[in-house]
Amino acid sequence: MRVSTANRYETAVDSLQQRQRDMAEAQTAMTNGKRINKPSDDPTGAAQAERAYLSGQRIASEQRSVDASRNAMTLAEAALGQAGELLQSARETLVNAGNGSYSPAERQAQANQLANLRSQLLALANQGNGAGGFLFGGQGASTIPFLDTPAGVVPGGEGGQTLLSATELMPSTVDGQAIWLSARSGNGVFTTAADPANAGSGWIDAGAVSDPAAITGGSHQVEVVDNNGVLSISVLNGGAPTVIDNLPYRAGQAISVDGMTLHLKGAPQAGDRFSITPSMPDLDVFEALDRSIAVLKNPAANAGQVAQAVNSGLRDMDAVMGHMQAARAEAGSMLNRLEALDGRNQDRALWAKTVQAGAEDLDMLQAISTFQNQQTGYQAALQSYAMVQRMSLFDYVK
């Protein structure tokens, strides 16, 4: 077989070009620090690196949700803390308003202070979340949560929570209706109240549970009656007399019925009525303040009405404060959960980066050694080509 000079030259040039391409690829790998620059370099390693990269992207997306939820829960926890301070101020104001020596004008000043605290509480309830929505917006985060109407504060959005993940509990809003409008009324078991039509100055306290096993959950009525010239009280259950029937009235005397103990105080008149109803999760902090404010602003309110308003207001403030503290504790618990989730995401992100780096990163020492060998081989090939190029008949004739 005859090998022509042109064929020999072409083969040498192809070899030089291949060596040059190999050097360029090695140089590119050293520049970006990657062993795999295209799938054909290592199909298996490229697939592994791609899977690790996608896992890292999903983890990063989840982490953004964690950060958004943590921001919302931090704001919620702070807002509930401020609400607790405002409620404590409202409680202290109610205690001051119960001073029997206060004139109507002085009670009016206390009512104005309560109205100011109410406005601050409503502003907290309608606080924004910093992302164009409302912190206590529930499922309607873009709708103002609470509207102040002549009939009182009413919900403006939907209750519940908006979640940022279908697999992890990461809320971006808080159920404001459950926090601000759904505390348990009364003392948590039953609620006492005076009939607004009462003519006397008697009032009933919040009461307490004396025998949990005897609680029936029924409604009772306390009636003040004139029993042959003796002011007495009777307790009815569904209109029927109970064990307390025509009991001579003595201010502050304990009244025990169906596992409940309460006290009727002041100077009631015959015909006055008081109610005992089961506690319900419908205590509205704004309505509770409105009831107290209305009585304190009324210059015709007698001592019994003022005492009842103050006593019921204090009971409601205590119930709402306990409810708020529980909600704040829940927000703190959610923050702890999000912190733990953040830590897990960081560990998972590190794992994904480690797997990706192990699949595609370059061993720099080996790469430098390989490049130097390729460079030496290329230079030797160039010198050989130059020598072979002069081995022709024309050079010999010259």
Image: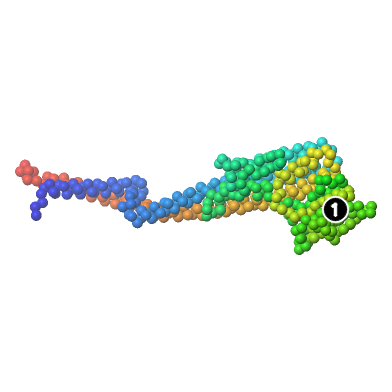
Residue 394: % across, % down: 7, 43
Extreme-left residue of the structure: 397
Tag 1 residue: 223
**Rendered image coloring scheme:** rainbow
Residue at figure coordinates x 58%, y 42% from the top left: 142
Residue at figure coordinates x 61%, y 53% from the top left: 333
Residue 313: % across, % down: 77, 46
Q: Is residue 125 left or right of residue 303?
A: left
Residue 184: % across, % down: 71, 52
Amino acid of disc 1: Glu
Residue at figure coordinates x 62%, y 50% from the top left: 331
Examine the rendered structure and indicate whether residue 216 appears above or below residue 321.
below
* Res 207 visible: no
Kind of element beneath mark 1: strand
Extreme-top residue of the structure: 105
**How many numbered marks appear?**
1
Q: Is residue 125 left or right of residue 267?
A: left
Extreme-right residue of the structure: 229
Q: Is residue 239 left or right of residue 152?
A: right
User: Which quarter of the figure is the C terminus placed in?
Assistant: top left
Residue at figure coordinates x 67%, y 47% from the top left: 180
Seen from the viewer's position, the closer of residues 242 and 5 is: 242
Bin the neighbour count of mark 1 within 10 Å (Cα to Cα): few under 14, some 14-19, many 20 and up. many
* Res 132 visible: yes
Residue 13: % across, % down: 18, 46
